[in-house]
Amino acid sequence: MGGNVLYETIKNEIVGIYAGSHKKLRNGTTLFGELDEGRWHTYLLHPLTSSEIARFEEQMQTVFPSQYKDCLSFTNGCWLFDLLRIAGKAPDTYRGMSEEEESFSPFPLEDLQQLYKRKRTPPDHFIFADSFVKQAYYAIDSSGHVHEVSYKTKKTVRSFDSIPQLLQSIVEEGKEQIENDLYYEFT
């Protein structure tokens, strides 16, 4: 199955899980699973075009791993089930955005990488996501594997073959949480 088909399958699962509990913002962000006023369990941001991804790479002065580019063409960052935050390209300006659109904008990739990149970080690790719940960040290595790395030990806790495999794992865990009525509170 191609990357875009996998991402569409994951999106369709998310839509099905929340069964109509969603809201689309003017900036293209879709919020899913309203927990209380202004708090949503999952959100997917509008995708980037290939030219926007190319400009983003220029801005970051790097070449992104191909599967991260595929991810950006599906969603420019996201927050899934309070379990995973994938960083993306922050807006060039927040002018004209509502407060809600600003708060559901992508977490900047450069900020995420600055948070976690250390001297001991392998040079081939491209950091693209994190999880407060799992106390981990996620990096793609040069072979395309995704590593869940502990904040504390800086060691790989789990590995995935790809970003879609990681996302599918998060979706399964998210479904389980919803079935067990388990939600996290962040302060």
Image: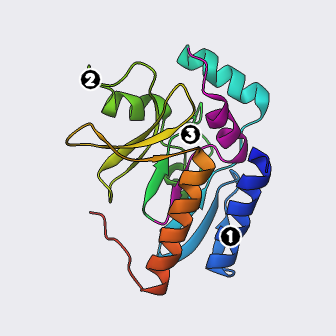
First along the sequence among labels 2 and 1: 1
Which quarter of the picture shows residue 26? Answer: bottom right
Question: For the point 51% across and 56% down, which residue is it?
Answer: 79
Give how far apart the Cα atoms at labels 2 and 1 are. Answer: 37 Å
Q: Nearer the viewer, mark 1 or mark 3?
A: 1
Identify the secondary structure beneath mark 3. Answer: loop
| Residue 70 counted in the magenta span | yes
* Labels 2 & 3 near each other (Cβ < 8 A): no
First along the sequence among labels 1 and 3: 1
Identify the secondary structure beneath mark 1. Answer: helix
Q: Which mark is residue 94?
A: 3
- 168 displayed left or right of 147: right
How many numbered markers are drawn? 3
Which amino acid type is shown beneath numbered disc 1?
A: Glu
- 182 displayed left or right of 7: left
Magenta span covers which residues?
62-81
Q: Which residue is mark 1?
A: 13
Q: Nearer the viewer, mark 2 or mark 3?
A: 2
Q: Which residue is mark 2?
A: 120
- 183 displayed left or right of 153: right
Residue 169 makes an appearance in the image? yes
